[in-house]
Image (spheres, grey):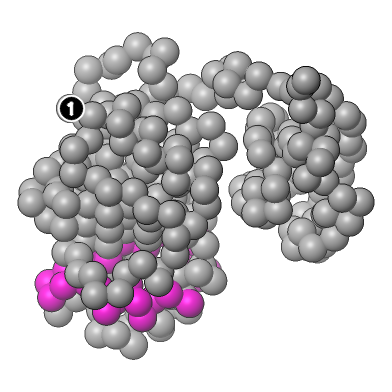
Amino acid sequence: MDNIYLEYNFTVSPKEPATEILIAELGAIGFESFVENENGVTAYIQKEEWNATILEDIFVLNSDEFSIEYNQKEVAQTNWNAEWEKNFSPIQVNNLVSIRAPFHENPNLKYDIIIEPKMSFGTGHHETTHMMIEHLLQLDLENKKVLDMGCGTGILAIFAEMKGAKPIDAIDIDNWCYENSLENVERNNCKNIDVYEGDSSLLINKEYEVIIANINRNILLMDMKVYTNCLAKKGTLLLSGFYEEDIPIIDAEVSKYGLKLETFIQKNNWVALKYNKE
C-alpha cells in the first residue's frame, strides 16, 4: 500500500534567502522532499509523521522579513526522482568543474562530479557550495588530510579527492545526507573518503590540514573551537553557510583561536571565507 503524503505549497516573497531557510527548517522536522519553483517551494511529509502543530516552531514563517503563504493537500506517494530530474540542471564552475546527474551529458571538463542529491543539500546550485568549490580550486590538496563537515551530498569531499586529497572524512548529522553521501562517494569511484553520521563530537583527537565547513552560522559559532583544535599548523579553514553581514561575528570567533582571514568570495550576499592557521 502506498504511503499517504501531505503536500505543502509555499509561496515565498522575497524568494531568497527565505526559501533556503524554509527548506532547512522543514527538513529538520520531518519533511522528506522539496521541489522549488518560481514562486517558492513545494514540500512533502508522510501523513503519519505529521501533526497539526508541526509548523508552529518554524522560525522563518514568523519572520517580519519575508511574506510566506501556504496551502496543503493530501497526495499519494510521489515519484521523487522524476520530480527531481525535472528540476535539476547541470552546472559548471569556472569552466573547470562540471556537476551533473548520471543522465546529463558529460561536458568533458577537467573535473566531472556526478551526484544524485535527492533531498540533501549540496548540488552546486546553491551559492555556498559553488563558492567552496571555487576556494578548493585554488588550493593544493595533494595528499592533504581533509574534513568535510556538514557534507550534505558529499560533493565537496568528492571534489577534494579528485584534487588529490587523502584521507578524507565526511560528516553529517542528518541520516539522509549520510546515506546520500555514501551513494555519491561510490558513484564517483572515490577510494579515500570515509563518511560518518554524527556531529563535532566525532572530531576528538583528529587532525586535518584542510577543514571545509559549509553549515549555518549558529552551528559554526558553537563548534568553532572544535574545528580550530583539529586544524594542523599551517592548515586552511574554509567556512560558508552565512551572509555578508555575519562576517564580523564569524571573524571575531575564529580570531580567538589565532586564525587569520586571508580572502573571501561573495555571491548574492552569501559568503565563503578562507582562514589560515599560523
Residue at image coords 81%, 41%: 48
Residue 39, relative to residue 128: is it above or below? Answer: above
Which is nearer the eye, 242 or 218? Answer: 218
> Whole-percent x and y of residue 120?
52, 41
> Whole-percent x and y of residue 278?
14, 79
Residue 132, relative to residue 98: is it above or below? Answer: below
Mark 1, other Cα within 10 Å: few <14 / some 14–19 / many ≥20: few
Residue 131, relative to residue 233: is it above or below? Answer: above
Q: Amino acid at mark 1?
A: Lys
Instruction: Determine the image quadrant of residue 172.
Output: bottom left
| Magenta highlight range | 222-247
> Whole-percent x and y of residue 248?
45, 77
Residue 200, relative to residue 92: is it above or below? Answer: below
Which is nearer the eye, 136 or 1? Answer: 1
- Is 241 magenta? The answer is yes
> Whole-percent x and y of residue 125?
47, 36
In the displayed structure image, the side of residue 167 where residue 132 appears, left or right: right
- Is 58 magenta? The answer is no
In the displayed structure image, the side of residue 38 where residue 210 appears, left or right: left
Which is nearer the eye, 65 or 24? Answer: 24
Q: Which residue is mark 1?
A: 110
Q: Is residue 60 visible?
A: yes
Please, what secondary structure does the residue beneath circle 1 have? loop
Instruction: Determine the image quadrant of residue 8.
Output: top right
Residue at image coords 52%, 48%: 175
Residue at image coords 76%, 22%: 2
